[in-house]
Image (cartoon, rainbow, N blue to C red):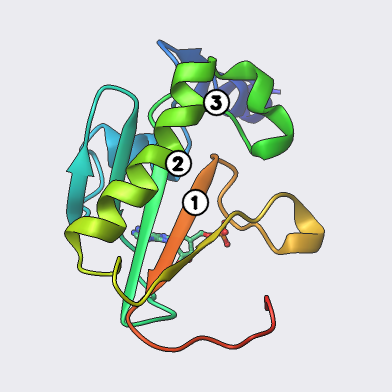
Amino acid sequence: MLAALLRAAASIEKEGRFMDCLFCKIIAGEIPSKKVYEDEYTYAFHDIAPQAPVHVLVVSKKHTPDLAHADQLSDAELAACLRTCAKVAGELGLEENGYRIVNNCGDDACQSVKHIHFHVLGGEKMSDRMA
Ligand code: AMP
């Protein structure tokens, strides 16, 4: 009972973040990250286990679990995610040769962190298959 209450308390939403969410903690600076870019709506940082020479995660500052819940974000918040992907790709020199944006949504896509985010991948020629 107490454990269940503590778990519930830990996941309480406060000002658009979830207290036990890894990416909410990174955005708040409670867990270190290699920041690439930040604005009002988004935060971008290097993936801890890169799958390409450049692998950056772009996350919405407002917590929502995945793209299926995108209606919990305003149009401005959602659009900002894609704008930040393009901005980061440009700043990291990916524009000329191109890059890939990936969003994993849900279990079949192997989404491991339940906070909406987009992978910016580039720096090498990728597979012509999506995954
Ligand atoms: P996904 O599987 O689409 O949910 O992507 C989650 C990503 O978060 C994976 O690529 C992980 O390598 C990455 N990740 C997990 N923990 C951290 C962390 N502390 N800092 C940076 N990236 C992380």
Viewport quadrant of the N terminus = top right
| Mark 3 closeness class: few <14, some 14–19, many ≥20 residues within 10 Å | few
Distance in Å between CA atoms under marks 3 and 2: 27 Å
Amino acid type indicated by mark 1: Phe
Among numbered discs 1 and 2, the one appearing first in the sequence: 2
Element at badge 1? strand
* Amino acid type shown at disc 3: Ser
Residue situated in front as seen by the camera: 114 or 78: 78
Q: Are marks 1 and 2 in contact (CB under 8 Å)?
A: yes
The residue shown at (34%, 33%) is: 42
Q: Is residue 121 visible?
A: yes
The residue sitting at 55% across, 40% down in the picture is 116
Badge 2 density bin: few <14, some 14–19, many ≥20, Cα 10 Å: some
Q: Residue at x 43, y 37 (%)?
A: 81
Tell me if residue 40 comes above or below residue 98 in the rendering. Answer: above
Q: Which residue is mark 1?
A: 118
Residue toward you, 111 or 71: 71
* Mark toward the viewer: 1 or 3: 1
Q: CA distance from mark 1 to mark 3?
A: 23 Å
- Badge 2 is on which residue? 82
**Can the viewer see residue 17 in this picture?**
no
The spot of residue 109 in percent (x, y) is: 74, 62
Q: Residue furthest front?
A: 96
The earlier-in-sequence mark between 1 and 3 is 3
